[in-house]
Image (cartoon, coloured by chain):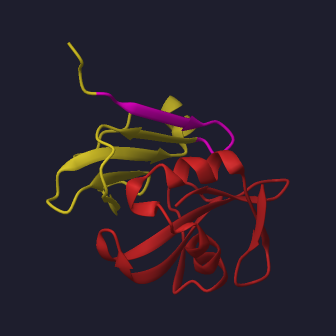
Amino acid sequence: MVKDKVKIWYDPEADYLEVIFDQKPGYFRETGSDQVMEKVDDQGNILGFSVLKVSALKKAPLEVAL
Amino acid sequence: MRLLHDYQGVPIRLTDERLNHILEHPEMVGLEGVIGETLSQPETVLGSISDPDAHLYYRLYTATLVGEKYLCVVVKFGQEDAFVVTA
């Protein structure tokens, strides 16, 4: 049985992580954290998220509502 | 690899790998040219709070696949040079 695919992109030089659940057209919008953006479709459904400065998570966990 | 310039003339590197990744997003297909335009003619440039080395360049586009939206190009200013992180 084929399951939904999750696409994970990590760019070590940029220290940037992107996780996409659904490869549909959408746009990134701000969350409660400047470090995290959520990608949504025109209905507001979550398509994925991105994290800037991932290495900062070594100091403390990051919790954001999507 | 492309070398773009921002509104202050600062050279900004855009690697093929990052550009290919950006263009994998369906809403960015065909919008390669607006990345450089947003850097050279931004409406707003903001510094990231969480990453002092990152700056966000914004420019409004009215006819995208997802309607009227601001394109945000994230640029990181490293020790060697500046480069596009994503858009």
Q: Is residue B20 left or right of residue B12?
A: left
Q: Is residue B7 above or below residue B30?
A: below
Residue A60 in view (yes/no): no
Residue B29 on image: x %, y %: 47, 61
Quarter assignment of residue A49: top left
**Would residue B69 be found to the left or right of residue B41 on screen?**
left
Residue beneath the point at 66% across and 45% down: B17
Q: How many marks?
A: 0
Q: Colour of chain A?
A: yellow
Q: Could you say where residue B79 lies in the image, as x and y percent from the top left?
A: 82, 53
Tell which residue pokes out farthest to the top in this image.
Answer: A1
Q: Residue at x 78, y 54 (%)?
A: B1
Residue at point 32%, 52% (across, down): A38
Residue B47 x %, y %: 56, 69
What span is colored magenta in the figure? A5-15
**On the rendered structure, is B7 left or right of B11?**
left
Residue A6 drawn above or below residue B35: above
Whether residue A51 is in magenta: the answer is: no
Can I make out residue A12 in this image?
yes
The picture's colour for chain B is red
Q: Quadrant of residue B10?
A: bottom right
Residue sitting farthest toward the right? B80
